[in-house]
Amino acid sequence: MIKIILTTLIFIITFSSCIRKKDPASPAVQKTSDSHLITKWYNNHTAAITLTFDHGKPNATRNKRIHKLLLENDLIIDYELVTSLYQEYPDRLTFLYDSLLYWGFGYFGHGHYHLNHDTCTYEEAYENIKACYDLMIDWNLKPVANAYPHGGGHELQSQ
């Protein structure tokens, strides 16, 4: 009897998942008033995956081996930018411009300092992220994302 009930439940769950009105993986397309299409993902793909590397020294020897492997496999990666380190070690910024961006690699803000924003006040977290953003603008980069150092972002004041 239990076997029949379980089989029936599995069938109902499976069947009901196939008749959803909207596929969550389908691309989202919106039409603007001037006939431009806005898609959720690049080229109207159904999803996006971004490989990121939470490592502040992209020009390290071991990272260059990783870059070679990625490029050989037609992959790219996004690096964190802790802007205070890029100020302290300008060779990292030069490497970003001359190599990473040339290869199509990306970047994301990670704060001016590598702080755990969950241990900061709202103002401290904001100032750290804003300083990173402002420097990226000064460096003619186009910041579109920021990631919390230390896997943070759990506390209300840091969100």
Image (cartoon, rainbow, N blue to C red):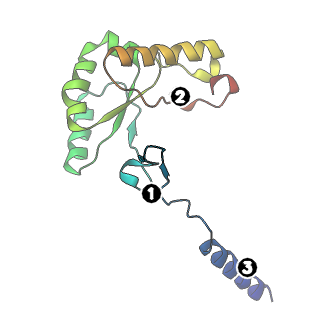
Q: Which residue is mark 3?
A: 9
Which label's residue is closer to the chain start, 2 or 3? 3
Q: Secondary structure at mark 1?
A: loop
User: In the image shown, does 159 or 53 lie closer to the viewer?
Assistant: 159
Of badges 1 and 2, the one in the foreground is 1
- Residue at x-position 27% and y-position 34%: 63
At label 2, counting other C-alpha atoms closer than 10 Å, the crowd grade (few under 14, some 14-19, many 20 or more) is few
Instruction: Specify the farthest residue to the front.
Output: 34
Front-most of residues 37 and 133: 37
Marks 1,2: beta carbons within 8 A: no
Give the residue drawn at x 58%, y 29%. Answer: 152
The amino acid at mark 2 is His
Residue underneath mark 2: 150
The residue under label 1 is: 46
Q: Quadrant of the N terminus?
A: bottom right
What residue lies at 38% left-to-right and 48% top-to-bottom?
42
**Mark number for residue 73?**
none
What amino acid is labelled 3 in the image? Leu
Instruction: Answer with left or right where residue 105 lies relative to residue 39.
Output: left
In three-dimensional space, the C-alpha distance between marks 1 and 2, rounded to whole angstroms, equals 30 Å
Tag 3, which secondary structure?
helix
Local crowd size for mark 1, using a 10 Å CA cut-off: few (<14), some (14–19), many (≥20): some
Image location of residue 47, percent across then percent down: 45, 54
Label 2 with label 3: CB-CB less than 8 Å: no
